[in-house]
Image (spheres, rainbow, N blue to C red):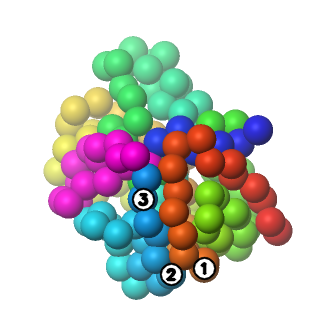
Amino acid sequence: MAKVLAVNISETKGVPKEPIDKGFFEVNHGLNGDAHAGNWHRQVSLLGQESIDKANAAGNLDLCVGKFAENLTTEGIVLYELPVGTKLRIGETEMEVTQIGKECHTGCAIKKLVGDCVMPREGIFTKVLKAGWIKPGDKIEILS
């Protein structure tokens, strides 16, 4: 079963995020209080625990949720294989995949900290279609 392991937030861009108990995700905005939220195509970032495990196996530090600045850390779903346009139900929300991977910007605190960042290769981005709360343990369903 695909599920949310952590909801992560930061007030500043380009830094690791901290886990929170639950987050409210607004339509055309993203996670309330997060630096990356806004009316654009990369409102919410997701990264699988499986990707974090790969980075750890490659000899990086003992990396954990939020270290790659992802809003949602997931388990049990290969995120980067989902086509753009895929709709997901996550907790109370509905989201649409808008981008797979990203260009890593220079001066990224994450890359400096861990040496390599899996987010540009295996992270995905979504926009919020239906608002609601997401918390660790919530199920992730592919709608279309």
Q: Earlier in the sequence, mark 1 or mark 3?
A: 3
Residue at the image point whose x is 47% and y is 83% from the top: 28
**Is 76 contained in the magenta span?**
no
Name the amino acid, label 1.
Leu
Query: In the picture provided, is 15 more to the left or to the right than 39?
Result: left
Residue at the image point whose x is 64% and y is 58% from the top: 90
Cα distance in 3D space between marks 1 and 2: 5 Å
Looking at the figure, which quarter contains the C terminus?
Answer: bottom right
Q: Quadrant of residue 76?
A: top right
Label 2, secondary structure: give it.
loop
At label 1, counting other C-alpha atoms closer than 10 Å, the crowd grade (few under 14, some 14-19, many 20 or more) is some
**Mark 2 highlights which residue?**
27
Of 125 and 138, which appears nearest the observer?
138
* Image: magenta residue range: 7-21
Q: Are marks 1 and 2 in contact (CB under 8 Å)?
A: yes
User: Of the numbered discs in the image, which one, if any, rests on residue 129?
Assistant: 1
